Amino acid sequence: MNQPQPQSERPPQRRGLTAIDGALALIAILLIVQMWLLTATLEGFLAGHREGVLPAALLSGVLLLACLGLYLFVRGVDREVRK
Amino acid sequence: MNEKDQLWREEVSIFAADERYVNRRQFAKFLVLTSAGMFVGNLWILVRSWLTGQPAWPVQPVAKLNEIPVGGVKLFRYPGPQDPCILVRHGETEFAAYSQKCTHLSCAVYYAPGPGRLECPCHEGFFSVRDGRVLQGPPQRPLPRIVLERRGDQLVATGVDLQTEAT
């Protein structure tokens, strides 16, 4: 039976792909949170609850920055591996 | 390799092994753009909440007291011509008026005198005729209540209560 290779023994291309997949999964999770945040804010706004609108916008901005950071990480790994 | 050549090689791989990287990077870019769209949506709600202040409600006669029988309704528009409302007489001296737009997807609600509730025929959302709260169905918010005043033998609309406390 084939034993899984330790991280350090895997070829760099394969490790890069794993890192990118992890980052993609994180971006997807952040996006789901952001979608929920948008729908909850809209529902609250239409119901007349305006107090949560500003914090929701700020949090959405933070999530966007996190997604952007992960994208830059993906791009960095991509460049590094395909160099 | 010149800069122009390097740019297109980053976007379109000529090696099959690199294809997986290009696909993943482009998918990540798409997800980030979607995230930016969500942020713009939140900003739009923020701007709308800043721009729309408390409106000044007009005073508008709706109906005469003896005009509607018990269990009867009258449709009217308030505060603007695009805002359909329904006035219900559900008791000898009990009147209630609500926006006729269902808070789910804006279908017109109608009064069902038997069970004594306002019903939306689209997705079977039911609202209490006494206070407009949701009894059943997909709506999440109560119906906006039209504030009524009795002036002589007339009912007059003086405002709209979004009923945020009832949610």
Image: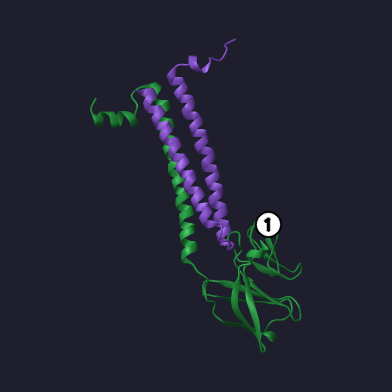
Instruction: Spot the residue most to the left.
Output: B2
Q: Is residue B20 above or below residue B84?
A: above
Question: What quarter of the picture does the N terminus of chain B occupy?
Answer: top left
- Secondary structure under the numbered disc 1 in the rendered image: loop
Looking at the image, what colour scheme do you see? by chain
Q: Is residue A3 left or right of residue A16?
A: right
Say if B118 sits above or below A20 in the image.
below
Q: Position of residue B116 (x, y in %)?
A: 74, 69
Relative image position of residue B48 (x, y in whole percent) = 47, 62
Q: Residue B16: image x %, image y %?
A: 38, 22
**Percent from the top left, x then y, of residue A36?**
56, 48
Query: What subunit carries mark 1?
Result: B
* Residue occupying the far top of the picture: A1
Chain drawn in green = B
Q: Is residue B4 above or below residue A81?
A: below
- In percent of the image, x 59 and y 79: which residue is there? B158
Point 48% across, 27% down: residue: A19
Residue bearing the label numbered 1: B137
Q: Colour of chain A?
A: purple
Quick one: label 1, few (<14), some, or many (20+) residues within 10 Å?
some
| Amino acid found under the numbered disc labelled 1 | Gly
Give me the residue at 58% from left, 63% from top: A48
- Depth check, front residue: B11 or A36: A36
Assign the C terminus of chain B to one quadrant of the image: bottom right
In depth, the one of A53 and B129 nearer the eye is A53
